[in-house]
Amino acid sequence: MGLPRIAYRIIEDIVGPENISDDPAVLAAYHRSGAMPPSYPPAAVVMPKTTEEVSAIVKVCNRYKIRFSCFVTMQPACTEPDMLLFDLKRMDRIIEINEKDMYAVVEPGVTRAALAIECFKRGLQYPAASVVGSALVGALAKGIEGHGYMANRFSDGRRHALAAEWVTPTGDIVRVGSLGVGAGWFCPTGPGPGLDGLLTRAGMGIVTKIAIKLYPWWGPRELDVETIIHPKTGAFVYKTNLPEDKFKLLMFQMPGINEVGWEKSIRNLADALYEISKAEVGTAIFKYFNWPMMIESCTTVEEAWEKIRSGIYQAETSRMINVFIEACCREDLEYQEKVVREIIAEYGGREAPREFYEDGFEEGKTLTFDQATISVLLGISSCRVQKFGGFISTACGVDSIDTMVKWGMAIPEIMREFVEKGLIVDITDSYWIVPTEYGHMACTEHLILGDPTDPASRKAMEEYAGKIMERNFREKFPDIMFRFGSYGDEHIKRVGPLYSNFHIWQMRVKKALDPNLVSNPKFYVIPEE
Amino acid sequence: MTLLEPNLIVKRLAEIVGTENVSDDPKVLEEFSRDHSFVKPMKPLCVVYPRSKEEIKRIVLFANENNIPLIPVSSGPPHFRGDTVPRQGGIIVNLSKMKSILRIDARNRAVMIEPGVTFGELIPELEKHGLRLNMPFLPRASKSVVTSYLEREPPTIPKYQFDYVDPLLTMEVIFGTGDEFRTGTASGPGVIEEINADMVNPFGPGDIKYFKLLSGAQGAFGIITWAMVKAEVAPALQKIYFIPFDKPEDTIEPMNRLLRYGVMGSVADQILALNNFNMAVILAEKWPEEFEKLRRNLPPWIVILTIGGYRRAEERIRVQEKCLMDIAQELAFDPLPSLPGAPGKEKKMLRLLSRPWDEEPYWKLRYKASCCEVFFLAPPSRASIYPKVVYRIASEMGYSITDIGGYIQPIVQGHAYHIEFDFPYNPADPRETDIVKRIYIRASKELMNMGAFFSRPYGLWADMVYNRYTEGVAILKQLKRIFDPNNILNPGVLSIF
């Protein structure tokens, strides 16, 4: 059906004809076929430049009841046919980096890497919040706030946002937090009740500017990234050299699944994570995110598959803890490293072989991980994982480290039948645990790997996700272990009553703020009341 | 709707909570009719003391049926901010009998408590588990822990505070509709005993961050029946340092630096600045002789800093001290292990930082019988411009600036400052009361005009702040209609509904 012509014309007048398109060839580029949950090509794509343009377009959408979603990076998500897609890439200004107050004000299209580099120049850093998408606020605008490796010291993306400029679902411009009373960008919450509690998911309009917390950076002002040609594949390999007296990446192999079994090994690993985070050391601590991290060390998809088939990384990395230390001085680094090593030793861990750190390809070794350091700092890891394709995420949640451990207990049993049939790759341990806020919480995500071009494999991945979800219900895991927005209205209506009727409250808020239900409705919840 | 007679209201409430848990004793009503703020006094109809979630629900439903305002109160007196004074009459819902510490989770460093649990009750219990709270500076022992965190009072260990609502985690709330709701990973499934989680993630359920919406609401959206809050590891070793300064603005840059350097980015555990008046008030044992002597001898402003050692405690402290001295040398300040002007008081100061005030009167009321607070938030770059404005206005209006209590608290890992000035006054003296009230109004307006952020607009601030927040107010009103459609909960407290 497409967009009503009159609406198209008005929006064209707002942004100029060069910034709107309904050309099928263009629209196809915004559609990821085979995505789960299903997505549709947009009816049109618009690329606004300013908040005022976004506001005006959203008002048009309300007048003509056009549903919209937005996109910066990661997969576009038009969850219904005939939606208007906002591509926010033209809104890519870093408006301010306030060194004294340690925040940056950015538009949705600013990428994490671009911001990180500008911050480094000023002795600051943005703790890259996620492995998804490269656009910082775009992630926020789309509702993917993301968890980062460095959450132990900096928490995750949900804590990084400060004051914001927000175009509501009806097109009004609202300044949230201190900005709302002319007090600047430094505080997201108040006056009074925190309206920043509404700024999630594209179902609540579009964030057009936001301030992001920054932290001190003790590394070089210019990040020296070396580009090397991989001798075997000819691909580019990026390396960085950070001052050795202030930065250290440590990798430890804890007693593995093959040595002490799934349950004992994961509980032991969790105990070590608790102790390290409680000791208040380690900017980043995490249970190694098995195959996605391995992909970071590969230069080509073929190389990654080769490693998977060899079984070497499954054997070597089944229970790994990575620790990234940032220190303000040599004494700080030595202290943190000593504490980390002491705890690892107490829990039977040992340092990973040197080839895990070094340019293994030069010596013909098969495992290299150093490149992951760059990803940790810049939050760019998604690029490779995305290109790898064929994976789905079955859970992504935050609660305690122990909750993440309990959740992971069911993985091997549920996965076994699919692995034995050859429909899902044998990568049982591919879920990470990232202690957050000095171990007060932790995040997990579990990615399974299959062949999206094979219908049987694709179906198996969906079945696996369904079985995990059934088990989540059976064993009463919290809501964060479910991807509510992805499973449709009927599912929400079934589970909502179990979770404080959140679907009803959410819908009431949604209807109050989005009376025409135009703002990415399927990503929000629309049950009948 | 038939309006109930007051005596019938008491009777009906007694059916819900028992006669011993309702009071319309005039003395009790008088006590809840006013506080130390300039909010106009008004007597409630009665005070009800629920002991369970079920009773709260029934009270909320009863209030809805009969169109009677409810004013939730959890802390014991004295109250300073007008948030517990009925604006439209009604029933005080006094939660002080809900005193259970429901769970101390030492492994995850979290504690689940009912709203009547006070700092005075919780801290000794946590100490038994080797834990402490990231608590505000010297709250009264009778202060509700849940209310303090729900109202975003500034904690004294900024390194642990990841956003402005931290350390509040999950909670259970009865909305103004009478519906029960739980936030974050406590939302379900089913009853909390069955949830397969430790309930420490505050976000959600679903896409809304309810814990943020409920914070700073002064009870206008719902009544909290329990909350999970963070606790922290008590340090194995602790050292205290004092850094003297002449002016409040001079304290800011050193505090900035101490929160941007050191192990895991911060030299400091607890860190705050007090002026000599406040230091003397809290440290004096013989009143008023020692108070006057301390006030004279102490430096005008002092940054108080503690350094904590956890694992390998001595080594950690050595590293932190090295970092402290690096900064001190660069900024030319002098960190002292002893308190200048009051040697021998160091241990007492260290103790005061981790305990509530358990003496009578509350420390803010030691100098005079009442105290007016002016507090607000500022980013680091602007924190130093406001104190001189407050002193100028006080001086112009004839208030002795040596009687002003000053307190500066870095928060959210050093990303902002809570700045507070306290004006003690004698409420029996109309002239003095009038001067303080006029300072309060003029200073607040002038500070707001300069960009100071009154993020918790209590009392007379509500009108001043919300008048400037028209975009947000429209949304707040929509939310109020959802969570409390009959405007039962604390009507008038935010001035906008």
Image: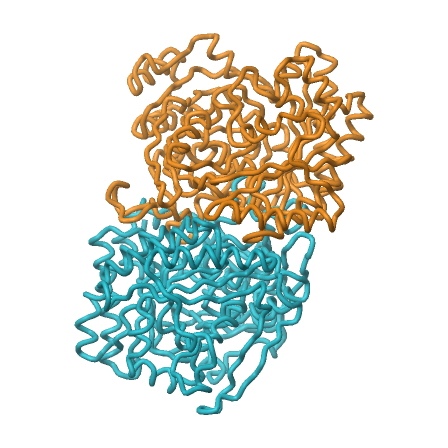
Above-or-below relation of A480 to B476: below
Above-or-below relation of A197 to A522: above
Q: Residue furthest top?
A: B26
User: Colour in which chain B is shown?
Assistant: orange
Q: Is residue A432 left or right of residue A184?
A: left
Q: Residue furthest right?
A: B396
From the viewer's side, name the closer residue of A405 and B446.
Answer: A405
Q: Position of residue B200 (x, y in %)?
A: 38, 46
Q: Which chain is cyan?
A: A
Q: Is residue B61 left or right of residue A278?
A: left
Location of residue B447 (image quadrant): top right
Location of residue A201 (image quadrant): bottom left
Q: Position of residue A96 (x, y in %)?
A: 68, 60
Q: Is residue B387 left or right of residue B33?
A: right
Task: Quarter of the image for the N terminus of chain B: give it.
Answer: top left
Q: Position of residue B211 (x, y in %)?
A: 45, 43
